Amino acid sequence: MRETLRGIAPLVASPPAFDATRAEHIAAQRFGELGAATELGGERDQNFRIDTDDGRYVLKISNHTDGPETLDVQAEALRHISRTAPDLPVMQPVPTVEGNPWTAVEMDGETHLIRLFTFLPGGSPSGGTLDEDALYEYGGTVARVGRALRGFFHPDARYEVLWDLRYTSDLRELIYAIKDDQRRALAERVLDRFDDRVAPSFESLRAQVIHNDLTLDNVLFDEGKVSGIVDFGDLTHTALVSDLAIALASVMHRCTDPFDAARHVIRGYVEITPLTDSEARILGDLVAARLLSWGVIVAWRSVEHPEKTDHTTTGVEDGWALLQSLERTGLDVVGRRLRTAALSSNVPYPRMEQSELLSRRQTVMGDSPLFYCDPVHFVGGEGVWLFDSAGRRYLDAYNNVQVVGHGNARVADAVGGQVSKLTTNTRYLHEAVVTLSERLLETLPDGLDRVMFVNSGSEANDLAWRLAAAATGRDGAVVSEHAYHGITDATVALSPADWPRKTRPDHVETVPPPARSHHRGAQPSGAEAMTAALDRLGRRGYDPAAFVFDPLFTSDGIFPPNSERLTAMAGRIHDLDGLIIADEVQAGYGRTGSNLWGFQATDVVPDIVTMGKPMGNGHPVAAVATRSDIASVLMDRTGMFSTFGGNPVSCAAALAVMDVIEDEGLLAQTREVGAYLHDGLVDMSTRYDVIGDVRREGTMVGVELVSDEDDWTPATDTAKDVVEGLRRRRVLIGSSGSSDNVLKIRPPLVFERDHADRLLGVLDSVLETECDG
């Protein structure tokens, strides 16, 4: 090992070894402060608390390797902070009796420079004692120190110390000192990752003079509030984001939920200093680098300099444990989670209080509907979690649009990468739209060989209706009793859930969902019901162009169909040369867990398939798949073109969604978690009479609430109270059905067993409150 390694000199030299008596003498003779000295410890320096009649001070005896130029940088930095941010509680230097910033003292042939500082109240908290507000303040304090030092310049500011994350790669020369084989192998992997992902771009990051050691040892707290910022000994000019990474490493190893703690710290930081994309991208790797630096340096010192015991060894085992845990989680996953938290506040609009936001919304948007009596102001998301403006976390068991999870990094990277390159339309050649079309058709039955792109599920269903009407020359439609298929004129007519005053359009008839079982409250449905609906249409002068159905009959109350009954219904339509349209906007993209599309759980083969909502994981993209003979009628008659439909950005999002579903095995996970959730709900139904039925396919779950099982009276008010009660406990679901009495559970496919446990536990608590058991 080269002891000339960059930044290692301050760590090699032995710290001063003054005793308390001499410290008292120096404080009295050189600084005029007479008092008792108590040693406080230190890594390279020696620190004493001096208790005088007038107050407390800290006497700092510097390592002999730190000369006047190093101390001058620190002194000027403190003065700069006092000028630019006088409310920051930084330690203040006390001059000598001669008015100098420090004094020099000889010991064992070495010269040590000594300073006196004001003593700051508070202490170093354990992570578990800090609540959300304290963690938020901690993050904000780290950012404020960086902002206060912005613009500070000193010719000697580039202090070389191995704790600077820019020297992480050099740690490779020290890992021989790690005696544990698993830890040494872990160190190699982290260093390889750092060299590949971080080192090439580190010097291009925003850089300035930073504190470089704002751990929970150096940011003091008193009664949950930041009370002091101490120890500027590692101050140097390096990447600004290092301060945040060091703070995160400090807090994450002390907290039982590292990511939750990190999120609050990040939120506090980015509210003051938003991160750039390049900083956010490597934040997770910088946290790992800091943890590794800690472990490697302590291991090296214990081998090469065992006489140099210092406070850096405290908690190092926890640091190793955290680093191992992060690797088990996956450093890519860790990076995405921290990146999501970091970028959640990088928005091109001002944040405002919820009351102000609600008032302004009502002024410009009128009575545009909102979920819940007490609306939620969300500012970020990650996987199955949503975060409100106060940083509180909500379990999302409702939003199927984000099918592969909120803030999915692969989708975000695909969208960001493509939007920075090209956004055009399908009248130009581009690989993305062709590749996406091919991949979609590969998942569908033979015969469906054409794809048309639009922007939303409503547009997809509108186009599907146009195709059916053109291909059949008819205008009659059959839909389920409480269906919802969109917001255009054509699709509202196909949506009994939204019919104005429940007025049925003449050209539309309805059928009950072909439920698997006829429990109390359900109506039998099948060929007989379809025949009756077609007869009613015929008496009004309409022949069927199409039967349009959601394969899970979601808006009707979630009724996974009986395949035989649904097939018989479709057969009656085909007998009259009508078409079958499967609306997969809610049921598709793996929701059933058995296949990508809901209709594939039955024997029905549609003539047209529509898709939207989850297709882009939040990016607006939708499509219609059909046969070429159907598509050609409309194309030959009027043509069809959507300016934004099938643009490269939308297609990049949709391709990424398909990749994630496949690569992460989300169909199998959906099957497993859906069955687990269903079992828990069925068990719950034995304890609560209000639960009349539990229906599900994959993770599309309907829990029907009834107030009287004999009459099957819908418990509409109870369902509303349960949904609101869950929201108050930070769990999100919705409701469905013609009486709005069916709890609608429809989480992202990344929903796991522990998330299901949380949902079940909170739902149990709410039902106990609302229904008195």
Image: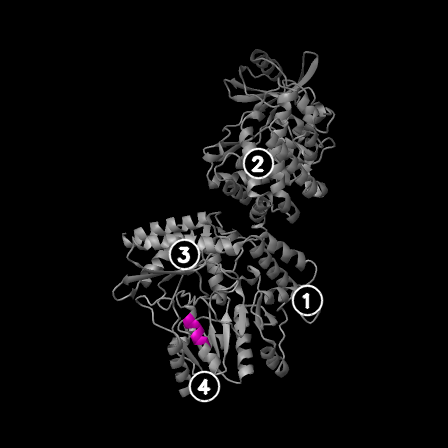
Please state the horizontal and vertical placement of residue 677, each as a whole percent of the image: 41, 53
Q: Amino acid at mark 4?
A: Tyr
Mark before the other along the chain sequence, 2 or 4: 2
Residue located at (66% from left, 23% from top): 101
Q: Which residues are magenta?
A: 564-570
Q: Give the spatial CA distance, label 2 vs label 4.
A: 68 Å
Q: Give the spatial CA distance, label 4 vs label 1.
A: 41 Å
User: Which element type, helix, strand or loop, lies under badge 1?
Assistant: loop
* Contact flag, marks 2 and 4 (Cβ < 8 Å): no
**What is the number of the mark on residue 323?**
2
Foreground mark, 1 or 2, reads 2
Mark before the other along the chain sequence, 1 or 2: 2
Q: Give the spatial CA distance, label 1 vs label 2.
A: 44 Å
**What is the number of the mark on residue 374?**
3
Foreground mark, 2 or 3, reads 2
Please state the horizontal and vertical placement of residue 656, each as a whole percent of the image: 61, 57
Foreground mark, 4 or 1, reads 4
The residue lying toward the viewer, choosing from 634 and 152, is 634
**What is the number of the mark on residue 23?**
none
Mark before the other along the chain sequence, 1 or 3: 3
Q: Amino acid at mark 1?
A: Thr
Q: Give the spatial CA distance, label 2 vs label 3.
A: 40 Å
Residue located at (44% from left, 47% from top): 754
The residue lying toward the viewer, choosing from 468 and 248, is 468
User: Which element type, helix, strand or loop, lies under badge 4?
Assistant: loop
Please state the horizontal and vertical placement of residue 622, each as a whole percent of the image: 57, 67
**What is the number of the mark on residue 542?**
4
